[in-house]
Amino acid sequence: MMTCKELIHDFLMEYVQGDLGAEARIEFEKHLSVCPSCVRYIDSYRRTVEMTRELGSGADAASLPPPPPEGLVRAILAVAPKPPHA
Ligand SMILES: [Zn+2]
């Protein structure tokens, strides 16, 4: 099982760019299915990317990776257990 740090620092960019290998992708999604905090992180990351694009800050926005598909985040949120202190 990968850690939150590995997921965010080593795999997130590759994941959103579609560069993650099949096995790493399975591990990545397995982690998300048990880790609501990473799901929230990715969701806020995706929103930040979208917001930056909407602001139209030119080259900066263009250099950001594409956000992960919204359907995936929704699906994960739907099955992810609620954090005890939410
Ligand atoms: Zn995590």
Image: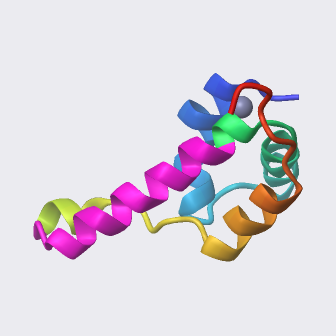
Look at the image and say whether residue 56 sits in the magenta stretch. yes
Q: Position of residue 59 (x, y in %)?
A: 13, 66
Residue 72 appears at what percent x and percent y? 72, 68
Considering only vertical position in the picture, is 20 above or below 7?
below
Q: Quadrant of residue 34?
A: top right
Q: In which quadrant is the C terminus drawn? A: top right
Give me the residue at 78% from left, 45% from top.
Answer: 32
Residue stretch in magenta: 39-58
Residue at the spot x=24%, y=63% of the render? Answer: 52
Identity of the residue drawn at 85% across and 43% down:
27
In the image, taking residue 65 as reference, residue 81 lies left or right, namely: right
Quadrant in which ligand 1 is drawn: top right
Would you say the magenta stretch is mainly helix, strand or loop?
Answer: helix
* Residue 66, above or below 43: below
Position in image of residue 31 (x %, y %):
82, 39
Q: Where is the N terminus found, in terms of image quarters? A: top right
Between 33 and 79, the one lying in front of the other is 79
